[in-house]
Amino acid sequence: MQVCEKQEKCGFFEKHADCSSSIFPMLANIYCNGPLQNECIRKQHLEEKGCFPSDDIAPTGLSFSET
């Protein structure tokens, strides 16, 4: 599967790419590079509203913050 075409402009990916949590790589593999690309809440929001949601909203739709 190809990398999501929106990844380069995705604030979530840019903001959390260096995150020390093991959750980020898992989300990226499943949503950005994997089978759930079309289920990505960020991508759906962009298509419906013309802009990405907050950079802290994960592809799952939940708020993501490094603690």
Image: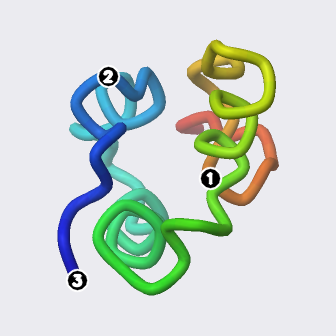
Kind of residue indicated by mark 2: Lys
Kind of residue indicated by mark 3: Met
Mark closer to the chain start, 1 or 3 = 3
Kind of residue indicated by mark 1: Pro
Identify the residue shown where x is 28% and y is 46%. 5
| Secondary structure of the residue carrying numbered label 1 | loop
Image quadrant assignment for residue 66? top right
Q: Quadrant of the C terminus?
A: top right
Mark closer to the chain start, 3 or 2 = 3
On screen, residue 28 above or below 58: below
**Label 1 close to label 3 by CB (< 8 Å):** no
Image quadrant assignment for residue 26? bottom left
| Of the pair 10 and 24, the residue shown nearer to us | 10
Identify the residue shown where x is 22% and y is 30%. 8
Give the x, y percent position of residue 33: 29, 70
Give the x, y percent position of residue 51: 63, 13
| Secondary structure of the residue carrying numbered label 2 | helix
Query: Which is more foreground, mark 1 or mark 3?
Result: 3
Q: CA distance from mark 2 to mark 1?
A: 14 Å
The tag on residue 34 is none
Mark closer to the chain start, 2 or 1 = 2
The tag on residue 59 is 1
Q: Which residue is mark 3?
A: 1
The tag on residue 9 is 2
On screen, residue 32 above or below 15: below
| Of the pair 55 and 48, the residue shown nearer to us | 48
Judge the density around disc 2: few (<14), some (14-19), many (≥20) Cα neighbours within 10 Å.
few
Query: Which is more foreground, mark 2 or mark 1?
Result: 2
| Secondary structure of the residue carrying numbered label 3 | loop
Q: CA distance from mark 3 to mark 2?
A: 19 Å
